[in-house]
Image (cartoon, helix red, strand yellow):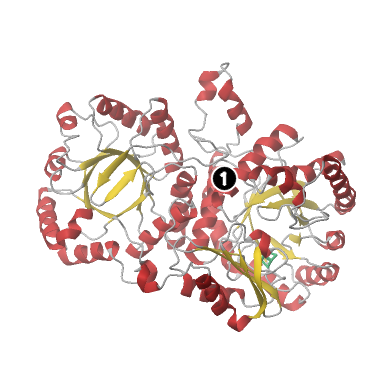
Amino acid sequence: MYQYRRRLTREVVFGTFSLGGYQPIRVESMTNTHTLDTSATVAQCRRLYEAGCEIIRLTVPTEKDAENLRNIRAQLRRDKIDTPLVADIHFSARAAIKAVEFVENIRINPGNYANTQKFSNNEYSEEEYLKEIEHVRLEFAQLVEKARQHGVSMRIGTNHGSLSDRIVSRYGNSPEGMVEAALEFARICEAMGYYEILFSMKSSNVRVMIQAYRLLVQQADAELRYAYPLHLGVTEAGDGDEGRVKSAMGIGALLEDGLGDTIRVSLTEDPVNEVPVGFAIVKKYNDFHLVNGDRGHIPLRHIIESRNKQANLDRVSDELPPFDPFSYQRRVSSQTVLADFTIGGHTVPRVETEIHASLTDGVAIFEEIVQRLAPKKLQDAIRSEFVSVRINSEADLDYLDELLGRLGDAGRFVVASTSDVSHFARLLDKVPKVRFDILEGERLENDFLQLLGNERFAAVELCFLHNESGIAVPSRVLVHLAEKLRKRGVSRLLFSVLSEQVVFVYRRLVQAFNSLKLDYPLVVRYKGEAASRLENIIDSSVQAGTLFSDGIGDMVALHTPLSSDDEVNLAFNILQGARIRMSKTEFISCPGCGRTYFELEKATASIKQRMAHLKGLKIGIMGCIVNGPGEMADADFGYVGAGKNRISLYVGRECVAENIAEHEAVDRLILLVQERGKWIEPAEFL
Ligand code: SF4
């Protein structure tokens, strides 16, 4: 929980390489062609191979598709493309049995493999429950046996939203149900002496996905013979920046935990686009191992069990997570008010961004502030609530006065940062919040502390500038200050650390705050200096997103080289990804695959363009009726492929309009949203 250590897993065979163990974290993608269309599928596999994709998955809906894997494989191998292939199976055991002959790995979904029911509300008696497990065992054992004969490994891939009726009847549609569904199949494998397995626990809800994987690790490590590898992914993450942010948050949070051996980023785009995103996510962790080779991992169950044990407390209590890793609960913080906004407590996390323009350039800084506080485009009706400027000199204080004069009322949202005590004192009556940056080794004298807590002046944020000399340092310094100031009754205080590794630093800080019952609000302040736009988006999402997904943070401030628009959008995308602040419509769209028979990417773009302003509404856009309705999980409305150029519309899980022609389906969806009273006009939204 406080430093990166990868969980050591069993190495599982994957054709030309193996996966897990000391192997690098692999990047996978999936074709969205029809598997019966050999030339289109081979062409797409080639493009994925050329993009560096390490594992290629293909959908196999029928035995015929499975049979055609023979031709696809032959053509790829003839062209010297030896990338391991994975057959993606839902429902059809016969397709699975056939596909095993032509692939390196087979993915089955425990929610629909050999289960006899789908989407019924049946209650299961104990006898019926056991009977169905036995039925599954008999069917699945045939696949296991054949996989063993062919040296093929298997992914037991559970998805939130496509659990079997039987599992749902006992565990609900929950992380616990997902874990049990996977373990049922793993038990069968182990009983047959077949150990070439890995797991996945996907969900479109980032928090559910993170919790499900952690829970699986806890239970699987307690029960199974080996620590099997994990394939990580957020399903139906969508497209564009939102899809990248959600994927990075879910996958990254688990990689930070040391979990994960292979990943797939699911985007509703050309699958080739998934590959660079995947590599951007795993790069840091693969590089870490090249340098460190550190694999020691303390299983979560040891950590949790230790909550109740006094023995060995000193060593283990240091490792206790400062939050529940298996269910979401926001850290309890006190409230403070800045300008028009309440911060902390139960209010949504606020967004602050740092102004890049120099104070000496009055025009540029004025324009940047206005743009951040009130963006011009409709799509960007989200805005930064605070903007921060840096004060480095006496002259800057004068420039700030000029700027505030020019900004008029908008000056209320400007905060200032400094590391100079005399500047700090003069800033306190100019802006609503002053951030004081504490350098490592710096001693803050009593004179400085006396300045804090005057209700007439600005709120103060004490920010430790972390230079990576140690994870514990920021918390020691800040906790010492927080304790001292609490004793003096200072309340309008916030705390932060400016760091590139905020996950571990903030966990340590929260742990220390919790132990002393300090509840000051925390500003998650991530500093990123990556070279590309994509890497900055990925790194910010992993670091800040992990904390918000675990309930830590009352405000977010990103310090990156990204443009104003990008940085503000990214901050809101992270909060939306963690489902802690919904600022626009949530789109849950699948990447499409061989089961898709309409123009999914075009439909997604059109729906997003017309409905992106419906704040808080969740819309599922799914490629097929086979898996779509289940996997769009908790969407309020669904747009689901029902056959060739046909769409069915859903309200929740209920299908309300079937087989609409594709060209009129988006209009019908909007009509449906209007009929259900969920529509607002874009102008009203502004
Ligand atoms: S929901 Fe989408 S990705 Fe999943 S099987 Fe259907 S079309 Fe393929």
Image coordinates of residue 257 in percent, x first then y, are 55, 40
Closer to us: 401 or 551: 551
Q: Is residue 281 left or right of residue 657?
A: left
What residue is rendered at 58% in x and 41% in y? 258
Reply above or below: 214 against 489.
below
Q: Which residue is mark 1?
A: 254
Image coordinates of residue 187 in percent, x first then y, are 80, 40
What residue is rendered at 84% in x and 52% in y? 151
Give the quadrant of residue 117: bottom right
Q: Residue furthest top?
A: 311
Closer to us: 565 or 597: 597
- Residue 11 appears in the picture as rendered: no
Reply above or below: 622 against 214.
below
Give the quadrant of residue 98: bottom right
**Quarter the C terminus occupies:** bottom left
Q: Is residue 257 left or right of residue 365?
A: right
What residue is rendered at 78% in x and 67% in y? 61
